[in-house]
Image (cartoon, rainbow, N blue to C red):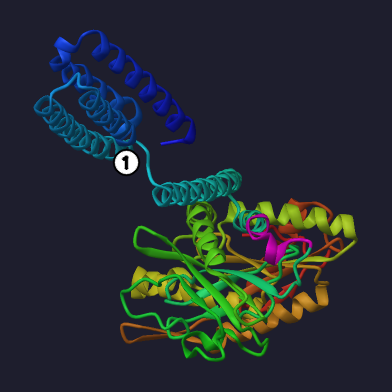
């Protein structure tokens, strides 16, 4: 109870004492009502001022009873009874106050959390707020990735799509590829090789993110890939201490690595590799971001590979795998334009298998198909990587040699003739020696137009056949014979 409350209780008690004495002085015959007057006052004082207030009223009541006894207005028995009654009322008031205080405290404890509880709630609130901010940041990153992925899906050619993918990765991992990056991180994409379990690197053409240092080809053993199982994403802090992918370190001293398989329908359609010369260069957050990027890139890669396959099927011969005549003529037109623009030579070789109809008639079409396939394979091998080779007709083939003068083209044609003639085909126990007749023409020496260049090569081929076959002839203006 406060000091102000105590003062009020004292004044109230004095006031009550004076009133009681006045009452007893004027009505001595009603002294037995004295206790009845104080009982509710004790209870009310206990309610208003708690236990101290009830005690003050009780003490003042006892003093009043003793004073009344001394003045002779209250009998000894009545005074004793009044004092005992007031004591009992005071005791009851104390019990009621304690019970009320206990219930009030319990109620307050329920409604008002303690400081520790408030601190816990505040910590949880801060944690939830931090998590929400983190989720919001991740959501923004995912939106950026999604926007980048949409741009990938609109590109059908493999190299332009992967170039755009590199740009998306650079924007998503600015710490490694941004303006402030140290340039130690390299990035490479691999796609499956046809008919093997190997992966071939797709060259990064004209992009600032380099793929230098990565091997051109990865085998299943290089990747520690178990048979009939797909690769798992992998983060290596130091390849020098981890023998699983040590082959990727090579001579370039790569240390940190992230391997992200590009998987669709339980099959790897590609691999994304990020490597750094620094140890522990990639954090768990970088790894998570790279996995998300891989899942976005895989859809675009699948689309470009399907498109490439459809395009390949439409421009290649199903029997030999060489270009078909229509596509070859389109390439010839492009190369002639390039030769005209840059003042370069362009040579055309047309060759024909000698007596091929006789092979089909005598040994059957299975042997004939084997001869065509063998010829196509040896043509590609001998013509060189820059040559464009096509199946021009039934047993007729064509080879386009960009930036090649006639003398060099003639030597290549002679090498092809010798290479094919030295080979043989063994199908079902049948061994055949193959000979070819070859005609060569060159732009702009022999012709300035596409059809004229083809006609010139055809006339040289006819001249080779007319002179006994198994020959290579270069076009000269004296060839005025019509082509077969």
Between residue 434 and residue 336, name the one nearer to us. Answer: 336
259 with respect to 335 (left or right) = left
Quadrant the N terminus occupies: top left
Instruction: Tell me what residue is drawn at x 75 percent, y 72 percent.
Output: 183
Q: Is residue 341 magenta?
A: no
Regarding residue 375, the answer to whether it shows in the image is: no
Q: Is residue 458 above or below residue 356?
A: above
Please state the horizontal and vertical placement of residue 393, each as a whole percent of the image.
Answer: 54, 59
Q: Main secondary structure of the magenta part?
A: helix
Q: Position of residue 362 (x, y in %)?
A: 35, 74
Image label count: 1
- Residue 69 relative to residue 253: left or right: left
Judged from this view, the residue extending furthest toward the right is 343
Q: Which residues are magenta?
A: 169-179
Q: Quadrant of residue 221?
A: bottom left
Mark 1 burial class by Cα count in 10 Å: few <14, some 14-19, many 20+: few
Name the residue tied to disc 1: 109
């Amino acid at each position: 109870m406060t000091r102000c409350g105590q003062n009020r209780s004292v004044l109230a008690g004095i006031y009550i004492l004076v009133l009681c004495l006045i009452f007893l002085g004027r009505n001595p015959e009603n002294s037995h009502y004295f206790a009845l007057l104080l009982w509710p006052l004790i209870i009310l004082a206990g309610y208003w001022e708690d236990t101290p207030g009830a005690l003050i009223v009780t003490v003042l009541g006892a003093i009043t009873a003793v004073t009344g006894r001394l003045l002779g207005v209250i009998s000894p028995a009545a005074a004793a009874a009044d004092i005992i009654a007031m004591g009992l009322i005071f005791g009851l008031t104390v019990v009621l106050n304690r019970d009320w205080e206990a219930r009030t405290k319990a109620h307050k404890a329920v409604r008002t959390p303690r400081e520790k509880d408030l601190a816990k709630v505040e910590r949880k609130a801060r944690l939830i707020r931090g998590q929400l901010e983190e989720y919001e940041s991740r959501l923004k990153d995912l939106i950026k990735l999604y926007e980048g992925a949409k741009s990938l899906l609109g590109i059908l050619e493999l190299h332009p799509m992967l170039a755009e993918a590199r740009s998306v990765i650079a924007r998503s991992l600015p710490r490694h590829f941004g303006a402030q990056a140290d340039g130690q991180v390299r990035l490479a994409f691999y796609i499956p090789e046809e008919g093997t379990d190997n992966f071939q690197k797709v060259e990064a053409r004209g992009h600032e993110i380099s793929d230098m240092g990565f091997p051109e080809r990865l085998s299943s053993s290089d990747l520690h890939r178990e048979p009939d199982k797909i690769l798992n994403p992998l983060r290596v802090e130091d390849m020098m201490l981890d023998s699983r992918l040590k082959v990727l370190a090579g001579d370039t001293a790569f240390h940190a690595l992230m391997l992200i398989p590009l998987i669709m329908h339980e099959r790897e359609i590609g691999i994304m590799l990020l490597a750094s010369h620094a140890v522990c260069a990639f954090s768990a957050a970088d790894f998570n971001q790279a996995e998300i990027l891989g899942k976005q890139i895989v859809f675009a890669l699948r689309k470009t590979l399907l498109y490439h396959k459809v395009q390949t099927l439409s421009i290649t011969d199903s029997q030999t795998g060489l270009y078909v005549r229509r596509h070859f003529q389109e390439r010839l037109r492009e190369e002639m334009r390039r030769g005209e623009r840059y003042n370069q030579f362009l040579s055309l070789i047309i060759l024909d298998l000698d007596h091929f109809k006789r092979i089909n008639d005598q040994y059957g079409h299975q042997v004939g198909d084997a001869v065509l396939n063998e010829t196509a394979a040896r043509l590609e091998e001998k013509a060189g990587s820059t040559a464009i080779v096509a199946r021009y007709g039934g047993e007729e083939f064509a080879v386009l040699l960009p930036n090649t003068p006639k003398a060099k083209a003639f030597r290549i044609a002679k090498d092809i003739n010798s290479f094919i003639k030295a080979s043989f085909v063994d199908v079902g126990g049948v061994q055949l020696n193959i000979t070819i007749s070859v005609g060569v023409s060159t732009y702009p020496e022999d012709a300035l137009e596409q059809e004229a260049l083809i006609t010139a090569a055809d006339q040289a081929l006819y001249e080779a056949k007319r002179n006994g076959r198994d020959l290579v002839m270069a076009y000269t203006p004296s060839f005025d014979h019509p082509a077969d």
